Image (tube, grey):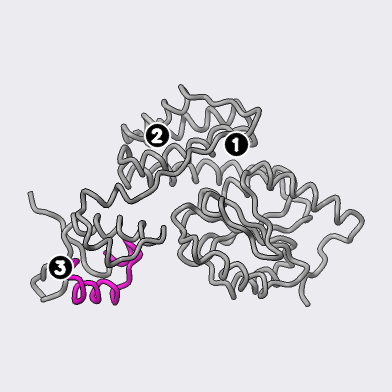
Amino acid sequence: MNTPSFTIAAVERDTGLSKDVLRMWERRYGFPVPERDAHGERVYPAAQVERLRVIKRLMDQGHRPGKLIATPVEELSLLAPRRSRPTLAEGHAVDSAGQDELLTLIRQHDANGFVHALQQRLARQGLQRFVQDIVAPLTQQVGDAWEDGRFEVFEEHLFTELTKRVLRQAIAALPQGSGSPRVLLTSVPDEQHMLGLLMVEALLALEGAECIPLGTQMPLLEISRAATAHRADIVALSFSVAFPSRQLPKLLEQLRDALSANTELWVGGSGVSRLVPPAGVRRFSSLEQGVEALAAWRSAHAGQPMGRSTST
């Protein structure tokens, strides 16, 4: 069987390491060691791509690339600190058997069975409990399984895409929001994870907020322009644990400065669990806190006309 190899453009997309960085490392450190295709272009064996992916993840945690590249591949995994497993909020039951069943369906690559099982749980529990008690903890379990090597990358993607499909269908079936507050939901460049945004959208839409989903990886200036165009009261961002934490403070300060003073900036997700938020930024460590903040926002703005402009 032929060993798969990948072009430099594919490696850049897969690992998050730019072509310039890959070439520089090749010259400076002697790794990676690409082969050449029939046209003389660089191609990278799968084993090297996997090692580059691990190196990039460790760099995002603060390790220096020169040391990582010199470290034997079998020792790289020892450098990655295991995340503490978050606990559910008080009052939320853990359906271990049900979660194991769902995880098994993904491992068996039974897409139809997984979607059907999700839809059954949604029908039984309602959207709020489905998001909080099923999707949120299951997402954490899938992330842990991928990190521990019990899930393949394609299996994690299958779970994500199928769960997004079920959530979008549920959100589309909800009545239109009241228009207050208007919440713009998106993520910044280099943050491509969507599932957290959909969970937040589902819970806020259930509470009657008008949600404006923009998808992922929006440039900061475009987020500011969209907030003005939609007269957003709140901009809500989601960050996964894969996002480089050292970039967060400066990035959020820049976005806060670009937004109208009347537009609140909320951030949540596992990627901001340890963040000390800059001034004017609200951090939430759970989905429930976001719902509580929505109620507090309405209380603080009671009596104000709906549809106010946030432009300055």
Instruction: Tell me the SS state at disc 3.
Output: loop
**Residue position marked by numbered label 1 in the rendering:** 132
Q: Main secondary structure of the magenta part?
A: helix
Residue 118 in the image: x percent, y percent?
A: 50, 32
Using the image, tell me which numbered label, if any, was put on residue 112.
2
Residue at the top extreme, as displayed = 97
Q: Is residue 15 magenta?
A: yes
Which marked residue is nearer to the observer: mark 1 or mark 3?
3
- Please report the bounds of the magenta region as a residue range: 10-32
Based on the displayed image, in which of its 4 quarters is residue 34 positioned? bottom left
Residue 150 falls left or right of residue 95: left
**Viewer-proximal residue among 142 and 106:** 142
Residue 230 in the image: x percent, y percent?
A: 70, 67
Q: CA distance from mark 2 to mark 3?
A: 39 Å
Q: CA distance from mark 1 to mark 2?
A: 23 Å
**Residue position marked by numbered label 3 in the rendering:** 34
Q: Amino acid at mark 2?
A: Asn
Q: Amino acid at mark 3?
A: Pro
**Viewer-proximal residue among 240 and 312:** 240
Residue 261 in the image: x percent, y percent?
A: 76, 71
Rendered position, 272 above or below 149: below
Based on the displayed image, in which of its 4 quarters is residue 155 positioned? top left
- Is residue 172 in sight in this rendering? no
Using the image, tell me which numbered label, if any, was put on residue 229.
none
Residue 67 in the image: x percent, y percent?
A: 27, 63
Residue at the image position 60 percent from the left and 67 percent from the top: 252
Q: Amino acid at mark 1?
A: Gln
Which marked residue is nearer to the observer: mark 1 or mark 2?
1
Check the picture and name the quadrant holding the C terminus: bottom right
**Viewer-proximal residue among 260 and 127:** 260
Residue 304 falls left or right of residue 11: right
- Mark 2 or mark 3: whose residue is earlier in sequence: 3
